[in-house]
Amino acid sequence: MMFDDPATRDPYAGAVTWDRAGDARIAVLYPPYIPLVRTHLNGLRALVERRLSEPAGQGSDPRLALLVERMRETTSEPQLEPEVLSEVRTRLDWALSVLPEHGGVLELHTPMHQWWWGRALLDVCTAITALLGAWLRGEAVDGQHCPDDATWWMWMAQMRWLDAQFVEPLKPG
């Protein structure tokens, strides 16, 4: 008989369950993970807001630079950084507005809602990927170098979890 060792268990396993009701996609989130998702969405939103309020020509943040680059790859018309970041901010605002305050049920009624939610979480994953890459190259982000290996791996685990639980399930078939 094998025993479940809490020390080796994935702390994020089973946190989100997806179901369908007609065209709607419904996610049931284990309640303690709602604040984690909200923290990531708010964190990226604050970073975007800070960048949009800075004078033009300021140095770029690697998290936003990668996000802007990836967004530009998806459009046929050239976009300036403020335009891209404004779109990101709008998506993040919307995602925060539909994330439940209490309870753990997230209802995405239309394919567009599903795309917006998945894209908002993909934006977060992209920013975390850029953070991890900068830290691996020994660069400071917001004046901070990666504190230690455990912190790097914690961010990697959260990025993978966000991708597996929210981005992947909402990709069009």
Image: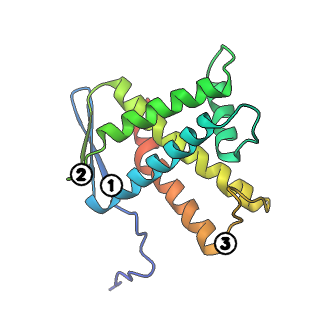
Looking at numbered disc 2 in the image, what kind of residue is underneath it?
Answer: Gly
In this view, 77 is above or below 49: above
In this view, 160 is above or below 97: below
Identify which residue is drawn at 74% across, 59% down. 140
Element assignment for label 2: loop
Q: Which residue in the protein does label 3 denote?
A: 147
Q: Which residue in the protein does label 1 denote?
A: 34
Q: Which residue in the protein does label 2 denote?
A: 104
Identify which residue is drawn at 41% across, 45% down. 166
Q: Nearer the viewer, residue 108 or 8?
A: 108
Displayed quadrant of residue 30: bottom left
Residue 40 at x, y = what percent?
Answer: 47, 52
Looking at numbered disc 3 in the image, what kind of residue is underneath it?
Answer: Pro
The quadrant the C terminus occupies is: top left
Left-right relation of 121 to 77 = left
| Mark in front: 3 vs 2 | 3
Between the residue at mark 3 and the residue at mark 2, the CA separation in whole angstroms equals: 33 Å
Between the residue at mark 1 and the residue at mark 3, the CA separation in whole angstroms equals: 26 Å
Residue 23 at x, y = what percent?
Answer: 26, 26
Q: Nearer the viewer, residue 57 or 85?
A: 57
Label 3 with label 2: CB-CB less than 8 Å: no
In this view, 57 is above or below 168: above
Q: Is residue 116 visible?
A: yes
The colour style of the image is: rainbow
Looking at numbered disc 1 in the image, what kind of residue is underneath it?
Answer: Ile
Label 1 with label 2: CB-CB less than 8 Å: yes
